Amino acid sequence: MNVKNRYLSFMLTLLTFLMIVSSCRTDENTQTQIDEFHLPIKIAKHQQYKNAAVSSAHHLASEVGVQVLKDGGNAIDAAIAVQFALAVTYPIAGNIGGGGFMVIRTEEGLYDALDFRETAPANANKDMYLDADKNVIPNLSLLGHLACGVPGVVDGMEKAFDKYSKLKNWSRLVEPSIELAQRGFYVTNKQASSLNKRRKEFKKVNDKPIAFVKGKAWKQGDILTQPDLAKTLEAIAKNGRAGFYEGEVANLLVEEMNQNGGIINLEDLKKYTSKWRAPVVSDYRGYTIISMPPPSSGGIALIQLLNSIEPYNIESMGFHSTEAIHLMVEAERRVYADRSKHLGDMDFYDVPIATLIDDDYNQMRMSNFDPSKASLSSEIEPSDIKESEETTHFSIVDQWGNAVSLTTTINTGYGSKVVVDGAGFLLNNEMDDFSAKPGVPNFFGLVGNEANAIAPGKRMLSSMSPTIVEKDGELKIVVGTPGGSTIITSVFQTIVNIIDFGMNANAATQSCRFHHQWLPDKIQIEERCLDENIIDTLEKMGHATVSRKSIGKVETIVVNDDGILDAAADRRNDDSVSGY
Ligand code: DON
């Protein structure tokens, strides 16, 4: 071996040694052990399954759900397991410290809806986010301990289990998440950058170390372990709702509040109850739409949108044609105006549901629709009815035909950023979904009024729209998405894509989206979505347009005519389908 070769061989040996040493490096969140949890994620965006399907924001959560189904659990069992798994693998939105809504259609064709939305603590009040001059204090309802509503997820999961579980083995549904939290999982590129982006805020509101902040920046392939969360999940596996709302975990949560100016107390936790509600149901071109009633505005607004466009032949206008976009936007403008006035928690405020979802009412609202010209939001008032960026969605169909559409949230990414010390879970910042002051926009630019004012024990208004669609009495579509105010219009477009434009689950899910919410008076359009000439024409008609990054992360399952489940997960993030 000459000198040059000897030098090369030495360098190679040194390099290999350095690689081994660096791959053995560990810190609290980084391990080198490679097993199935620690492999780069295997994302499947579109698959067809004969028996059962799950579409969720994380492939490990989808697989946890499918394993429950294979073990004889039904869609509700799988949903419970997926909810807990997302609380570990998708901390930006999956949660036990937040709330959500579950819409169910059973194999017998019965509908149900579970409301496990957070509530305002007993010590909350209408003006709690206003300064002495009655101006909204920026960020108070978004960051830190005062932003948190009383969590509803664990109570909701237990209620769903008690009424619908087929497996009848609660701890079996929580155990996969305990393992995921203990052993950790592979952090994707998107997760690494979203965690790094919030580092400052995490540090601002948490004075003790938390799993989401480590010595160095996160990078793809790091392993995130959450030992405190694993302990909390163990208490939930053992004691159900009592493991969370009472005892050690509840004490830790209240201690976290007391030390940091928060107001949730033990009584708030003890009293929290999720509620079974009657879903809102309506027809659209021969399909039955089944969706979430208040405290979500989602189901009502979705039905209003579909009713508003039903008299028009949108199919002949063409997908993403100026005519179709104009029609849908004008419907959105009117519906979101109504939302600002009439929608709130119906346990506290009389929501005129029957009128709002009535065909004639919505057609009356569209009577001043001009096919050639935009109306101005300043001229569209909410009607006068006289009558007493982060959430996550998953869709599941099981081998018997039971379906679950579930959207869950801690509101914006990582919620209030508060991690309960010793209990390892993130708390929501859902209080921002209330109207802190009439007419003042919240994080999503939504304005509200009396109907959505803060009151102790009241649920803040939501846009989450978990939806199920039937055709001729048979299950057809299970759909939903995150996206704040854009949730309703994303679900609207996905349903129209399937029913009117004949798309399959994947095309309907992946196609780009636009959104209008009355105020601000602008069509928000995903980047590189529409042809320039379509945008020009819309502007000439009087619409203001604005380009924005992605809208929604839709998870869709369509039951094809031959019974095959056509499952799609949104291309906009790491979402993934699984099934068998
Ligand atoms: O309930 C609602 O409408 C909001 N808290 C949802 C937030 C959301 O979707 C954020 N995701 N991107």
Image (cartoon, helix red, strand yellow):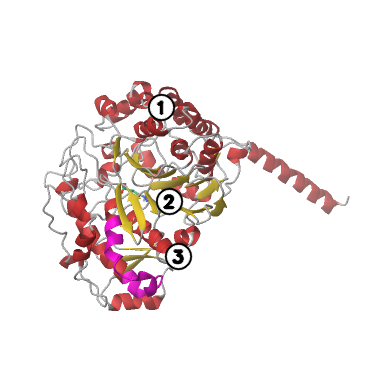
**Which circle marks residue 8 in the picture?**
none
**Which circle marks residue 474 in the picture?**
2
- Residue name at image x 33 percent, y 74 percent: 323
Q: Which secondary structure dominates the residues rendered in magenta?
A: helix
Q: Nearer the viewer, residue 384 or 431?
A: 384
Q: Nearer the viewer, residue 31 or 334?
A: 334
The kind of residue on which mark 1 rests is Gly
Q: Position of residue 523 (x, y in %)?
A: 31, 66
Q: Position of residue 120 (x, y in %)?
A: 23, 37
- Tell me, yes or no, if residue 298 can be seen here: no
- For residue 121, which quarter of the picture? top left
- For residue 163, which quarter of the picture? top left
Residue reaching furthest to the right: 1
The kind of residue on which mark 3 rests is Gly
The kind of residue on which mark 2 rests is Glu
Counting residues from the N terminus, which is met first, the one under dot 1 or under dot 3? Answer: 1
- Tell me, yes or no, if residue 565 can be seen here: yes
- The secondary element bearing badge 2 is classed as strand
- The secondary element bearing badge 3 is classed as loop
Q: Which residues are magenta?
A: 302-326
Label 3 crowd bin: few (<14), some (14–19), many (20+), radius 10 Å:
few
Q: Is residue 402 above or below residue 567?
A: above
Residue beneath label 1, please?
422
Q: Position of residue 536 (x, y in %)?
A: 34, 77
- For residue 84, which quarter of the picture? top left
Counting residues from the N terminus, which is met first, the one under dot 3 or under dot 2? Answer: 2
**1 or 3: mark nearer the eye:** 3
Q: Is residue 481 above or below residue 230?
A: below
Q: Is residue 33 above or below residue 195?
A: above
Residue beneath label 3, please?
502
Residue reaching furthest to the top: 247
- Residue name at image x 38 percent, y 24 percent: 243
